[in-house]
Image (cartoon, rainbow, N blue to C red):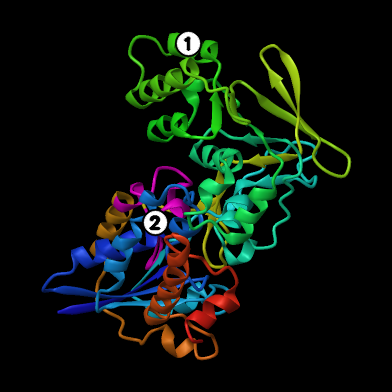
Amino acid sequence: MSNFKVVIVGAGPAGYFAAQALQNLANDDCTFEIDMIERLPTPWGLVRSGVAPDHPKIKTVSKVFEKIASHENFRLFANVEIGSDISIAQLQEKYDAVIIATGSSLGKKLGIPGEGLRGSLSAATFVPWYNAHPDFVGVDTPLDADTAVVIGAGNVAMDVARMLALEPSELDPTDTADHAIEAFKKSNIRKVYISARRGPEYAAFTSPELRELPKLEHTNVIMDKGDIEAAIVRTGDEPEKEVKSNLDAMLLIAENPKSEHERTMQFLFQHTPKEIIGTDRVEGVVFSTPNGDVTIKCGLVITAIGYQAHGIEGIPFKNGKVVNNDGRVNENLYVVGWAKRGPSGVIGTNKSDAAAVMQLLVEDLKSPKNVGDISVLLTHQIVVSRDHWKKINEAEVAAGEPHGKPRKKSVTREELLKHADL
């Protein structure tokens, strides 16, 4: 029997699904010892720091991750950073295969004037801020104006707009960061625009997300019926299934606009941002539209136009992702998830993607190296193991219970490590 040692870099959905695929591929002739490295003291990636707090159902996939992690041949090495604590070359030397599952955490830029003004943020900064990511606790998020503009036509843009337009008390029973709930409760924002460069038929929203919008209890949701009807005409008699589902959901919103609440989310289609205006801070956005330029006054602009991967020394990157051939990078190095294909799909997309790459990895394996593992190289780091994470998890859940929350997240590394008794 051959026992192979594999290391996965990144403890988000793609990493866990890669581990699960390897566990499923193990047989009488071939077994796997899996080590998972994570930069933060906490695993789960975007399920913890990306999914909107008011969508707790999506977060239940963490139960699947916990089951994968309970496997006797699985170890977690969290609070360990590739580059500063250990290198890719060292991992390639120690393991039979190295899998990159680091996701895409950098927000793409619009490349227009005014993007550097105070009050102009990327969703890649704003989302982890309200989700209690340790690296984004002190983000300057001015919420003192009455209007915000979210630029983008995907679910992240919709999440951001919804978080800004909700009645903040609706977040009390969620795991939103305490500092964010406090800020939202003081917020003056009452009008949130979501702007899309193209027509409704091209929007990357998903229909389940759209269908939830009319259920918002304290927020008006507005779409121009003419925009949606024109898009339906443009798509013809046989639109793609997802496009038809989206347009049907949009038409329902457009035909039943709410107008009784003081908080409003309004969708703007065929609005291309040209410039963010202001002197010391954001004061408005100039859009190009089919009817000429339009300026919307606002004090906050959040761009949600996509993500790209962070570069890692020793790994080839191009166009914001790892250069790869069906997940193969080079000798004993593989990539899965957003770092492989770019920021596309939902959490479940990573499952089939990882399974396909792991199948190739297993086909490539020859004989085990048997040269030890990384534990001997991490003697100076404070490493968060699976047992340490269990303590952090239990402490957060216990802290949330008296408040009716699924958990009360700790936001600083110091506090997280304290929970772990480290």
Q: Which residues are magenta?
A: 327-351
- Check disc 1 and report its element: helix, strand or loop: helix
Considering every residue shown, the one lying at the far left of the view is 28
Residue 268 horizontal/vertical position (percent): 61, 23
Neighbourhood count class around disc 2 (C-alpha, 10 Å): few under 14, some 14–19, many 20 upward: many
Q: CA distance from mark 2 to mark 1?
A: 39 Å
Residue 375 horizontal/vertical position (percent): 42, 87
Q: Report whether 336 appears left or right of 269.
A: left
Q: Which residue is mark 1?
A: 229
Residue 163: assigned label = none
Q: Is residue 407 magenta?
A: no
Residue 336: assigned label = 2
User: Residue 12: which quarter of the image?
Assistant: bottom left
Residue 257 horizontal/vertical position (percent): 52, 20
In the depicted structure, whether residue 70 falls above or below residue 382: above
Q: Quadrant of the N terminus?
A: bottom left
